[in-house]
Amino acid sequence: MKKIAYASCLGVIGILTAEFAVIGIMPQIAAHYQITMDQAGILMSAFAFVVAVAGPFMSLLSSGFDRKKVMMASLTLFLIASVVSSFSPPFWLLLAIRILPAFLHSVYYAAAIAAVINVAQEKDQHKMMAIALSGVSIATVSTIPLATYLASLFTWQYSFVFQSVICLLALLCVYRVMPAMPVKVKPTIGSQVKILKNPSVILSLLMILFMFAAEFSLYSYFAGYLYDVKKINAISISYFMFLFGIAGLAGTWLAGKVLSRNIPATTIGFIAACNIIIPIFLYLSGISIFWIVPLITLWGVAYAPGFLIATSSISSAAPGALEFSNGMAASFANFGITIGTLTGGAVIAAYGVNELPYVALFFGCVAIIMTLIRISIERKKSTKMAILKTA
């Protein structure tokens, strides 16, 4: 059981490194192609937009295939994209080749989560998902800052070389460790799509969208924000990304523990910390290292469990359609990333990077409202069912 979770985790590290390492090298890419930082941000927003649009359909199409083969196909495409990107092609080609693996992004997550849930006992499902999705924090603490560090020492192309190596290692690990996992009963499209009639599913998806819009309106410009607002140099930024990721490991572990007790309360707590409290203090604090270090640490703790919270929320709302529901979760998460990155870029262009915390604050509040509405609806439903039973 844990072997499958760890193999899935390494795959997550490979995909996350290829997806998000661009955040730490965005200033260098902008300088190389002589474009503005908000224009370079399209490398994040375009990727996320394709994931958002293609995710549900690709998850439906792939739901009947062997999960090991699906995961390997996804990692192979990320590997190819990273290799091509390392040759610093024209910007239009860099953008196009970066978009290509986005079509299988949701597919990997849906297959990995379904694989972990299906082999775990119900009481251990959140813990096993936490192991698989701890790849988010591990990538944030290790491979993503290391990719940024290599770019600061040499050139940004070395970041993509490093991403290629990580994707290759992840592919080999999934191939060697994961057993064949064919789907015994292929779900029909109708049986999966009908979950969209459930108000809890819709509200969970909207919560995911606004939560990720809040997180990535600020995190997508992590390097630029620290450089321009907090006056931190490129090499030090890689150290702060390392600190951010280390803190994220603790955050993911903590979320994995408390989610099994109360998913809505955990969701609200982490969203409020990451997207309300931290942005306020980032905005009000100066450039003193005594403020920056604890804020980056707490930000990492609150940010990292976002993927785990999204997965737990949607899985609890639609346990009978894991591939499709998690594909939808990944889709809405990337819609949120698209919206957050584009909104953040627009705010930078109009008002400056210093105003980004306002964007995170707004989207974070909306995400909490979606969660509160779901809680209210489910309580009313539970009360109604209790009355019917006693009648």
Image: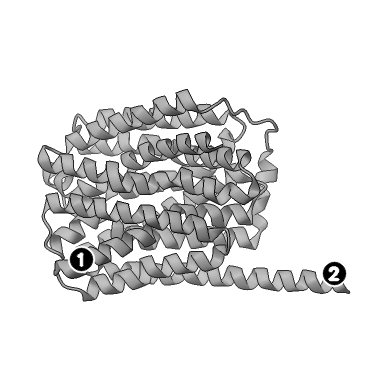
Is 330 left, or right, of 90 in this rendering?
right
Residue 95 visible somewhere in the drawing: yes
Residue type of the residue flagged with mark 1? Ile
Residue 174's quadrant in the figure? top left
Q: Which residue is mark 2?
A: 389
Residue 202: image location, x then y, percent: 58, 60
Is 164 left, or right, of 6 in this rendering?
left
Q: Which residue is mark 1?
A: 292
Residue 177: image location, x then y, percent: 48, 27
Label 2 environment density (alpha carbons within 10 Å; few <14, some 14–19, many ≥20): few
Q: What residue sits 28% from the left and 41% below the top?
A: 143
Does 365 appear above or below 81?
below
Q: What residue sits 57% from the left and 58% below the top?
A: 260
Residue contact between numbered discs 1 and 2, judged by CB atoms under 8 Å: no
Residue 142's quadrant in the figure? top left
How many marks overall?
A: 2
| Distance of label 1 from label 2 (alpha carbons) | 55 Å
Residue 200: image location, x then y, percent: 62, 62
Q: What residue sits 18% from the left and 34% below the top?
A: 158
Is 21 left, or right, of 186 in this rendering?
left
